[in-house]
Amino acid sequence: MRLLLVEDDPMIGASVQRGLKQEGYSVDWVRDGAAAEGALADGVHELILLDLGLPRKSGLELLAALRRRGVATPVLVITARDSVADRVKGLDAGADDYLVKPFDLDELSARVRALLRRQGGRASPVLDVGPLSLDPAVHAVTLDGAPVALSKREFSLLHALMKQPGVPLSRAQIEESLYGWGEEIESNAVEVHIHALRRKIGAERIRNVRGVGYMVPAEP
Ligand code: CA
């Protein structure tokens, strides 16, 4: 799952990126408003972490422009400005949540999970497909109730597939959801992860749709 981090402070940016990567997200980091605009044009990010005080274009301007264009990607504003007026402005401009610096990384991850869950329109964060159950909040997968140990990439891959059972994802879509910019992708990386996943959860649970990609078959 790919997130976009817009933050000009090198220390905060690095620690947020590191922290969220440890949680298994791919985090693309840009350091000013103009670069953020470019990054957002791709539309590959599932959530945006947005600082308000930014060079070249303020976070508020960026957010307002995004919402005017009808982009509904959840935005978590992270900012040092803790005055009520700024919070109200941020929320009015279309922010989904607000976190004031300095903040705890655990709290940040919890809010990121909550927003991603809300975006999916699910009251319950747990995804169930047949005997498979995946809980993004605790990064846990069970098969017939028994825990399955997955690597971070395997987990992200299964998460992407289980979000849309019965809908095949192309290899490019899978790569896009698993890897951030500049991350080295081996040419057969997706196949390797699929192979490992199948070994752990059963080959029949991930179907290869010839010429299209991979899917988790929907179960009645
Ligand atoms: Ca700043």
Image (spheres, helix red, strand yellow):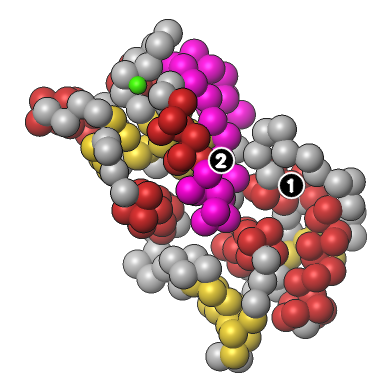
In this picture, is 40 found above or below 216?
above
In this picture, is 7 found above or below 33?
below
Query: Within 8 Å: ligand 1 and the Cβ of disc 1?
Result: no
Mark 2 or mark 1, whichever is nearer to me: 2
Task: Identify the secondary structure beneath mark 1.
Answer: helix
Give the residue displayed 80% in from the left and 70% down from the top: 196
Residue 66 seen by the camera = no
Q: Position of residue 142 (x, y in %)?
A: 58, 83
Residue 12 seen by the camera = yes
In this picture, is 100 found above or below 215?
above
- Label 1 neighbour load within 10 Å: few <14, some 14-19, many 20+: some
Task: Identify the secondary structure beneath mark 2.
Answer: strand
Q: Which mark is residue 27?
A: 2
**Amino acid type indicated by mark 1:** Glu
Give the residue displayed 74% in from the left and 47% down from the top: 175
Q: Foreground: 68 or 137? A: 137
Query: Within 8 Å: ligand 1 and the Cβ of disc 2?
Result: no
Task: Name which quarter of the figure residue 156 lies in.
Answer: bottom right
Count of number-bearing discs: 2
Identify the magenta region. Answer: 18-42
Report the residue that reaches farthest toward the front. 11
**Amino acid type indicated by mark 2:** Val
Q: Position of residue 33 (x, y in %)?
A: 44, 16
Give the residue pinned by disc 1.
175
Report the residue that reaches farthest toward the left. 84
Q: Is residue 51 left or right of residue 48?
A: left
Q: Quadrant of ligand 1?
A: top left
Mark 2 and mark 1: span between their CA atoms? 14 Å
Tell whether position 214 is magenta: no
Q: Position of residue 152 (x, y in %)?
A: 64, 61
